[in-house]
Amino acid sequence: MTSNPGTATDRTVRAARTGLIVLTLVNMFNYVDRQVVSALGETLTSDRGLGLTYGQFGALASAFMIVYMLVSPVFGKLGDRLNRPRIMAVGVAIWSAFTALGAFAWSFGSLFVFRAFVGVGEAAYGPVSPAILSDYFAKERRGRVFAIFSCAIPIGSALGYMLGGFVDVHWGWRAAFLVAGLPGAVLAFLMWRLKDPPRGAQDAGFAGGHGGAGTEPILTSYRRLVRNRPYALTILGYAAYTFALGGVVVFMPIFLERMRGMTKLEANMEFGAIAVVTGFVGTFAGGYLGDLLLKRYREAYLVLCGVTTLVAVPFTVVAVTAPDRMVYLPAIVVAQLFLFASTGPINSAIVNLVDPLERATASAFSIFTIHILGDVPSPWIIGVISDHSNLGRAMLLVPAAVLVSGIVWLLAARADARRQRA
């Protein structure tokens, strides 16, 4: 019998495309489940049974992020050793179940616990997904691949706002948690069936990594990552970026409702629609431009992230200070276009700066850092400042963090360029 030489290649291509589709779909529901609670802010703070303060509402986001960042390193190390689709499938099932359990919360404490356990499930997915994508696709295509994958972030976030707001208005906040969580059973099944590609398969010349990368103790891996200056600066810039976005995604619907006079449904629908459009356009443009520039500069992804983030700073200031609807809405659109341009390139930069056998570990360490310095404290800080002053003043932290992010990413690009010349 004559074998078809193209069969193995065709199967590899199909597996990569299927993996990208499933991972992107799961990533979208990942953010639906994260952000559905943000759409319910005004309801949860006025519900007689719960009666949350703004600080407690901000703490719900922090509860998820604290657990997410603490558990991510464990799953990151497992993701460099075990079958990655199986690990992620278990994570999808866990986070979806605890999202749905939010419908049965009877107090701030119970809802806090349910949201915290959502973080356990997502910790099994977040660190592993970039690593497996980098083994599905070659380096020169990763900007566009991560752009497709990252488009799920604004789309999922927007669906979380819009779905949560719509269901809340018509059937109540408990129904919103159920609707967001139940699709997880199907997603977990699809994830379980994915192929796990060989680690480093798409990296030309890869021959086994640095020493014990992938098998050494986790603290040894982290010490080497911290000594990797371009990588360390990259995740510090990412932390400032995440601080800013953490405040926006949690408090912008409440800000538009409380400070700008929109109705609950209007605030969630308009902000959600803006997030979908700007996220889709900005993320694809950033991924495409990053791959184009990478042909000439290895540090292109980081330069692109730094420049676009700095351009977003003045528009972010206007978005949270201008009282005129005809001014602040366009400012939100432009600011988010430039901010979302970083979502694909920054993940590509992270996986390209480390050894193929430690990419899940590197992604996990990145997740830990960006959340402990970023969106774990930012919703709580903004909420507390709002409780003691007003939400308008608290939101000024957002453009300040965006500025820091852009500067640090440019420093990371310079460090990477120096390392190449050394």
Image (cartoon, helix red, strand yellow):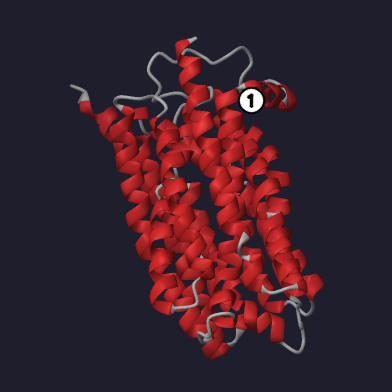
Q: Is residue 254 above or below residue 66?
A: below
Q: Residue at x 43, y 58 (%)?
A: 335
On screen, residue 12 above or below 46? above
Residue 49: % across, % down: 77, 87
x and y percent of residue 183 in the render?
50, 66
Q: Is residue 56 left or right of residue 311?
A: right
Q: Left or right of 339: which side holds 41?
A: right
Q: Nearer the viewer, residue 18 or 357?
A: 357
Residue under label 1: 225
Relative to 31, residue 295 above or below: above
Q: Residue at the spot x=41%, y=65% of the render?
A: 331
Q: Secondary structure at mark 1?
A: helix
Q: Is residue 192 visible?
A: yes
Label 1 neighbourhood size at 10 Å, few (<14), some (14-19), many (20+)?
many
- Quarter-of-image position of residue 408: top right
Image position, residue 393 (x, y; %)? 65, 68
Query: For this rendering, which residue is in front, 14 or 80?
Result: 80
Q: Nearer the viewer, residue 317 or 344?
A: 317
At 48% from the left edge and 29% from the top edge, which residue is drawn? 413
- What type is the residue that disc 1 sits on? Leu
The N terminus sits in image quarter = top left
